[in-house]
Amino acid sequence: MIKYWGKENQELIIPMNNSLSLTLDAFYTETTVTFSEELKEDHFYLDNQLQDPKATLKVSRFLDLVRQKADCSLYATVKSQNFVPTAAGLASSASGLAALAGATSAALNLDLSPEELSRLARRGSGSACRSIYGGFAEWQKGTSDETSYAVEIPSNDFENELSMLFVVVNDAQKDISSRDGMQRTVETSAFYDGWLQTVPQDLQKAKQAIAEKNFIALGEVTEASALKMHGTTLAANPPFTYWSAESMQAMNLVRQIRTAGIPCYFTMDAGPNVKILVERKNEAKVQAALAEHFDSQQLILAHAGPKIEILSKEDA
Ligand code: ADP
Ligand code: DP6
Ligand code: CO
């Protein structure tokens, strides 16, 4: 709802600004991590496909952090299933790295508190530090590895009154990863300072809206945060955008539906897909309006989702 966009420390993944997210039920990841004395290197399978050395190295680097914590030198086989398109701006890194953090720490019997797990997930992908929780979470940027982690936001179940309608206009992998896109923006965009300046007040508005269960206030600030974040990319060097013609079409439809009297607001992450925030009582109307312009397979309805779960654990 309030975007994370830019790092102060690339290696530790300390962000430039606090951010706020809502965990959803529709998109998720299941990951199994098995350490074994038989292995001579790490193996990484994503969606049943053995991954190439580059993708495997990213996972190995993350495993190294956990191995270090647990004083373990064994290699592992990681098998992950994304029930979310990978690298399409639908938060696969938040889902996937939260799952990897949970599974790896469970496999090595690290009994981490939510705060410690959030810090660990952060090292894999910043957005993952929020996604270990259900409902609303705020990533408090902190100033160091110890102080940068997410916390749950008390909401009195407001999230259960909300729906998020996904308009999946393209589920292919994006050309510019979130990591590269935000780094280029921080380093070169003339608009980046403008982005940073308004985040604290936007975050304050979002938290107040959640506390008061004020849907319109939450929707307005959510949409504004997304537009400002995407605005920064246009002034980067070289300039870029995650938007496509269909993203614009979906955003315009949201504005039209709103003018017709149904409150709904859009947000987008680092990709062309549009997410529409609407009150649950109005979800069918918004879905019907979008269905006039997009195929039914492109429209996915989501609601608030639960925190990370350890599904099973076998002690070797
Ligand atoms: P997204 O918008 O989907 O979050 P990002 O550019 O932030 O896209 O991150 C995509 C990257 O996240 C992938 O290239 C991969 O490195 C990592 N990733 C996604 N899913 C998983 C997973 N299940 N396990 C491990 N890494 C994953
Ligand atoms: C636009 O968490 O994917 O979705 O920390 O480099 O892995 P890394 O980036 P990532 O960035 C997500 C950016 C965003 C906004 C958000 O999720 O808050
Ligand atoms: Co991501």
Image: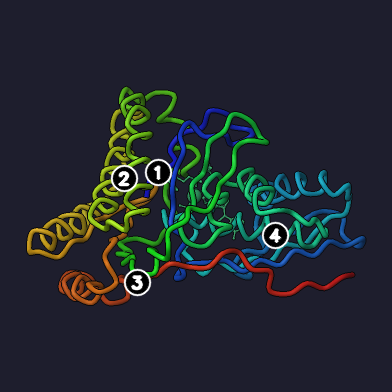
> Which secondary structure lies at badge 1?
loop
- At a point 69% along the width and 48% down the height, the residue shown is 116
Q: Mark 3 against mark 1, which lies toward the viewer?
A: 1
Q: Amino acid at mark 4?
A: Phe
Q: Amino acid at mark 2?
A: Ala
Mark seen at residue 226: 2
Contact between labelled residues 2 and 1, with CB atoms less than 8 Å apart: yes
Contact between labelled residues 4 and 1, with CB atoms less than 8 Å apart: no
Q: Which sits in the foreground, 270 or 220?
A: 220
- Whole-number angstrom distance, CA of label 1 to CA of label 4: 30 Å
Determine which residue is flagged by label 1. 3
| Image x and y of residue 280, in percent | 29, 72
| Image x and y of residue 195, in percent | 33, 31
Q: Which sits in the foreground, 31 or 87?
A: 31
- At a point 58% along the width and 57% down the height, the residue shown is 132
Q: Residues within 10 Å of mark 2 (few under 14, many from 20)?
A: some
Mark seen at residue 300: 3
| Image x and y of residue 66, in percent | 77, 49
Q: Is mark 4 within 8 Å of ligand 1?
A: yes
